[in-house]
Image: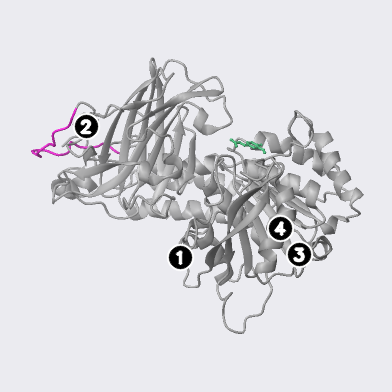
Amino acid sequence: MKGIRRAGFKVLALLLAVTLLVLANAAYLQASEGDQGLERVVVNEYGLDSEGRMVAYFGSPVVDGEVDEIWSQAVPVTPKYISNGVQASAKFRALWDDNALYILAEIKDDQLSDQSANTYEQDSFEVFLDENNNKSSEYGVDDVHFRVNYKNARTADDGDIERFYTRTKVVEDGYIVEARVALQSAPVNGKVLGIELQVNEAKGAQRLGTINVFDATGTAWQDTSKFGEIILLGRPDNAVMGLNPYTLLTLIDIYKELDVSRYANFEIVADAIKAAEAFLDGEIETQQQIDDQVAALRDAVSKLEPAEWLANEKEFKALPNQYRWPNEQQGTIETVVYQATNRRGGTDTKKLHVYLPYGYYDEGNDRKYNVLYLMHGGGENEDLLFGGPGQNRELKRIIDNMIAFGDIEPLIVVTPTFYRGMDDAGEFHKELVNDVIPVVETKYRTYLTTGDLEDMKATRNHRAFGGFSMGALSTWYTYIFALDYVKYFMPLSGDCWIIPTSAGARRAMLTAEYLERVAKNGGYEPTDYYLLCATGDADIAYGNMVPQIEALKQLSDSFIYSGDVSKGNFYFMVAKGGTHHWNWVNQYIYNILPDLFRD
Ligand code: FER
């Protein structure tokens, strides 16, 4: 054994067959050699076993961006799928211990760029993990999709970023990523996890392509069944884990990135970080000492107060994990087929899904429900959010939970598509008014009775429209062309493109003035319409939305900016780290739903 330096560790060291993390000044975590005398599995030219799986042996590397000796015991994997135009190459290795899966990515690429606002278009490395290997298409609570760029900037498309610790190092011919994914359930010898590893190669602000181990389709980000597998082997029976400082290290990283200007009392966190760093530099004897530092850091963060200038902001709250699990009180999904006028003067047969809240069909229930229409993004369809009858996807589970916990009143949620029919995100408002609202709202118990335009107008307080990305575009257009029939608007990660050849980003004030004229010409007061906008600061739409939002703020007679909908009719919620991805969008919906239908 090497690196056992602290007397307090001696007893442990005797027991220790494989893994010991040694804390010595700032250079904690010296790994010991693993898998002595273990049989090694035969692998093919790509480094995969006879069943095409990656193989991880037991061992705890030090995650510091340096390739420790222990990595020489891991199996090098040469990724097979390299998209056209990619010049980079990569080699991956994996290890595991009782707490985590470790990946080493050595990437050869002599031009590194983080110019794109879209994190997956930066030179970066991605880990996809399906911990229970159930290959659910949709990401479940056990699935993560993490990314880190060559400068060690981490993003999470799915999963809790606190479970992802990395160090990167730029070297002469590329960069090295050392990554650790904390596991949720105890791993054992022979356990098989779903996994995919990906390198994004960037040039300037473009992505040239990707390097993948298992997925040739480029759709692992939305479908965990595209992952391959990794088998965990080589844990000796008498292995004992050393101290685990990674939660603490991760929190220090994350809290150091917090925007100081957003808090009135950031010094309490700054002090806690300093204390934790001093602690890590000192002598550490027990896990409890580390855990106490973690608790102190979390406690400091929980005491943060928003800075004064943020008093008007809508604060993003991460979705509680509990809300991702099925509630006992579940709504149901139904499918409605209807006819929609198409561009050729004919009609298309289309379908949409309808979420009916728990209790909708209870005997004697004659309650009427508010209706939220939710539009998908480009390339997606009406099945994305709810699937269909009998399915229980994440958005449905969130809404079920929100209703069950009393966060919101029961409501109906409708997921149509802008494809076919007029086949355009910007034209969907016509189909909404002509076909979708009358069909849906006369079929179900809503406030609409006859389905004619006057009735639709009289019931606009009971209708909301929101959407993601190109669905946000549909939302802005619905505001512009169907304000008479809808009161609440929820554009998520998308700006308004009503001014020709330019988006809300480039002609922000013209766009804002246009939006103001819509309300004024319609004779509406600010309390008659709500623009509840959101995105993430790592979202491709962020830079497009900011100028438009700033311009709207200036028209404060019409757009009264406040995170409190009893004080204003317009906000822009920004999630730190939020990417252009439904895992984030579902959380925006979670945050915004309580602000709908407040009459
Ligand atoms: C935007 C950024 C991206 C936006 C739409 C997109 C409507 C759509 C991207 C895509 O579909 O790929 O600001 O606004």
At x 13%, y 37%, the residue is: 41
Which one is earlier in the sequence, the residue at label 3 or at label 1? 1
Residue 338, placed above or below residue 115: below
Report if the CB atoms under discs 4 and 3 are less than 8 Å apart. no
Disc 1 residue crowd, few under 14, some 14–19, many 20+, Cα 10 Å: some
Q: Position of residue 464 (x, y in %)?
A: 71, 58
State the residue position of label 4. 464
Q: CA distance from mark 4 to mark 2?
A: 53 Å
Which one is earlier in the sequence, the residue at label 4 or at label 3? 3
Which one is earlier in the sequence, the residue at label 4 or at label 2? 2
Say which of 446 and 29 sits in front: 446
State the residue position of label 2. 75
Which one is earlier in the sequence, the residue at label 1 or at label 2? 2
Is residue 299 on the magenta stretch? Answer: no
Q: CA distance from mark 3 to mark 1?
A: 34 Å
Which one is closest to the eye, mark 3 or mark 1? 3
Question: Which secondary structure, mark 3?
Answer: loop
Q: CA distance from mark 3 to mark 2?
A: 65 Å
Q: Position of residue 301 (x, y in %)?
A: 55, 52
Amino acid of disc 3: Gly
Which one is earlier in the sequence, the residue at label 3 or at label 2? 2
Amino acid of disc 1: Pro
Amino acid of disc 2: Val
**Magenta-highlighted residues:** 29-44
State the residue position of label 3. 451
Does the beta carbon of the residue at mark 1 sit less than 8 Å from ligand 1?
Answer: no
Report if the CB atoms under discs 3 and 2 are less than 8 Å apart. no
